Amino acid sequence: MDEFSFPVVAAWVNAAIFATAGLINFTAVKSVRDVYGRWDVAPGFYRPLGLVELAAAVCFAVPSLRFWGVLLAAPIFFGSVVLLLDHRHYVYAASVVVMMSGLLAALLEIPSAANFALLNSSHHGLIQVTGGSSAY
């Protein structure tokens, strides 16, 4: 990592948060199943949620995909806040709101389209062609 700007750190912290939450939800440890059961969340909801959280973590880790990470993460954070407030867990809801502010910071570290170029058909993909701030 060339530089440790606040937006880069926020993107990586969000990646770590979503990777951890995704693994916990996808593996469906008993305590997670119990909490979801007490809160009347649909059975089995934790597995697709875990997959989406893992996808968000991957997107946060790749600079050209950070926008998609924010798009995946924002509704998860919002739903978490609503669910926590509904069950009167105000301190936890406030901490999730603080984590949501990291999404705004991560948005600042999304590379512009001018930094990427489409490769020819033999390579299939995007590469970064200019310097600028990068998380690598």
Image: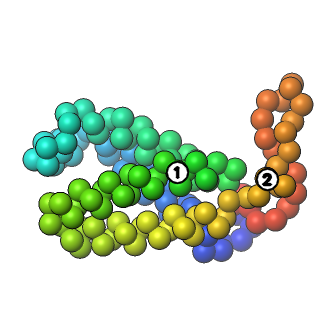
**What colour-coding does the image apply?**
rainbow
State whether residue 25 appears in this view. Answer: yes
Coordinates of residue 102 in the picture (x, y in percent) = 50, 68
Q: Residues within 10 Å of mark 1 (few under 14, many from 20)?
A: few
Task: Say which residue label 2 marks.
Answer: 113
Residue that extends furthest to the top in the rendered view of this protein: 122
Q: Is residue 67 shown left or right of residue 54? A: right
Considering only vertical position in the picture, is 130 above or below 8? Answer: above
Q: Quadrant of residue 6?
A: bottom right
In the picture, the disc for residue 71 is 1
Q: Is residue 9 shown left or right of residue 75? A: right
Decide which of 27, 129 is in the foreground and name it. Answer: 129
Q: Secondary structure at mark 2?
A: helix
Q: Amino acid at mark 2?
A: Ala
Considering only vertical position in the picture, is 130 above or below 122? Answer: below
**Image point (71%, 71%), residue name:** 3
**Image point (89%, 31%), residue name:** 120
Q: Is residue 121 shown left or right of residue 72? A: right
Decide which of 65, 27 is in the foreground and name it. Answer: 65
State whether residue 16 appears in this view. Answer: no
C-beta proximity under 8 Å, tags 2 and 1: no
Q: Residues within 10 Å of mark 2 (few under 14, many from 20)?
A: few
Decide which of 27, 48 is in the foreground and name it. Answer: 48
